[in-house]
Amino acid sequence: MILIISKSEMEDTTNQVMDWLDTFNGDYYRLNGEDFMNKADIINGQIQFESFNSEAITVIWNRRWSSRGLINFENEEYYDALGAKNSSTLLRSLRQENGILRSFLHSKLNSKVWTTRPEKTSANKIKNLEIAKSCNLSVPEYIITSNKYKLSQFAKKHERIICKPISETPFFSSSIDNDIVETLILYTKSFTANQIEEEIEDTFFKSLFQQQIIKEFEIRVFYLNDTCYSMAIFSQNDKQTQVDFRNYNDAKPNRTVPFILPKEVEENVKKFCRKAEYNIGSLDLIKSTDGKYYFLEINPVGQFGMVSYPCNYNLEKKLAKYLIDENKKVK
Amino acid sequence: MKTKKLNKKGALKESIEHLENQLPLFFKNPEIKEQSAKIDVSNFLGLDEFPVYNSKRSACRPCYKPISKIHFINE
């Protein structure tokens, strides 16, 4: 049986893959993180939840877990009353409680085939850059530092550099009216060598900087079972999306078209995914104005709706087929 | 019923700016986007929730229809 680990809200990609699994008479079970946390019991080492049976599972599509945060915002006033220090302790404690239960579920499923193994769902960008280099992919030069002098030398060498999170981009929002929300835009930041000299303190919180690659266009590659499905994103001519296409221009979206990677680059991408142990993933690449293809990073759980629709790749169907084939193989 | 906690306009950006020196540099000079939290559905059909996978086997909850399945009334 195929197990889909997902979340219960705002997750239409899972529904679409399930449509295809139904079409192909696939044998599957969907487990949402929220339901596991709220309703499953663990009795003497056995997980008891509806008809969930870990023994029957062969292959796991590790898609999502939960969209609900640990704070119930109806109780926000109590967190305010607790203060930042105690709230942070409380959240850490809740996260640990949840984390151990989730990791127990993973341990029960350890021997199964996973699209993304649990320890791989959060990408280590630095490790991946090094793996990419060893697979002959070009990567932007980078420095992780808290020292202005070293950063300044790095910036002078490359003229323009970017700063981005080492882990995932955090999301902040705040309601200022019943119907209006303010959100903080924290995508990739670009700095010139002069800005580093003038605006940055001598020491700062350790951050990741990369040389800024002047791009001809960006490429999003969805990798599935040793096949690459690529899309070119023409983000370079719009100031809003020039540094990071995720700073979407809703009024005038970037043009996106199907793209075939040069054979050698595609082989190196596949080599990278095999070496880093990803069966599935969305990779960000840049085609630079000097003709090189640069690897930036991989999202191991793979956002693929944005590639599937514009390029007509029908990836939801391909993923369903892959899961069914894997299920048959293991059976 | 409890009312939603509202913050002062600009307080989010201001707070992050105050903490800036203790944060990684991608937090520097953050931009703020103001968005409506309310979705105007008056021109659309099909934004209702629908329990597609509410079978006994699936633990799925209702989910909004994908954008490709939304049809304008005038069409």
Image (tube, helix red, strand yellow):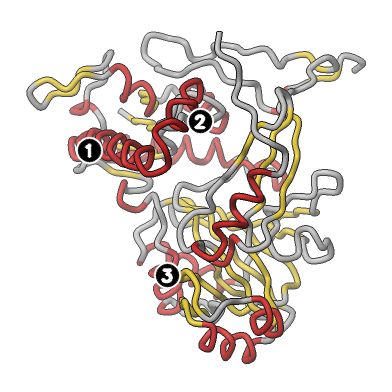
CA gap, disc 2 and disc 1:
25 Å
Q: Residue at x 65, y 62 (%)?
A: A219
**Circle 3 Cα neighbour tier, 10 Å, few/some/many (<14 / 14–19 / ≥20):** some
Front: mark 2 or 1: 1
Q: Say above or below: A50 vs A99.
A: above
Q: Position of residue A205 (x, y in %)?
A: 47, 69
Would you identify the image quadrant in which residue A113 lies? top left
The three-letter code of the residue at mark 1 reads Ile
Q: Residue at x 28, y 13 (%)?
A: A50
Residue sitting at the far right:
B74
Residue A331 visible here: no
Q: Position of residue A14 (x, y in %)?
A: 50, 30
The three-letter code of the residue at mark 2 reads Thr
**Looking at the figure, which quarter contains the C terminus of chain A?**
top left
**Where does label 3 land, which residue?**
A126
Which residue occupies the foreground of this view, A71 or A265?
A: A71
Q: Residue at x 38, y 32 (%)?
A: A5
Would you identify the image quadrant in which residue A52 lies? top left
The three-letter code of the residue at mark 3 reads Ile
Q: On the picture, is B72 further left or further right than A324? A: right
- For the residues bearing labels 3 and 1, Cβ distance under 8 angstroms: no
**Where does label 1 land, which residue?**
A100
Would you identify the image quadrant in which residue A112 lies? top left
Q: Which mark is residue A14?
A: 2
Q: Residue at x 37, y 48 (%)?
A: A116
Q: Secondary structure at mark 2?
A: helix
Front: mark 2 or 3: 3
Q: Secondary structure at mark 3?
A: helix
> Given the image, what chain letter belongs to the residue carrying mark 1?
A
> Given the image, what chain letter belongs to the residue carrying mark 3?
A
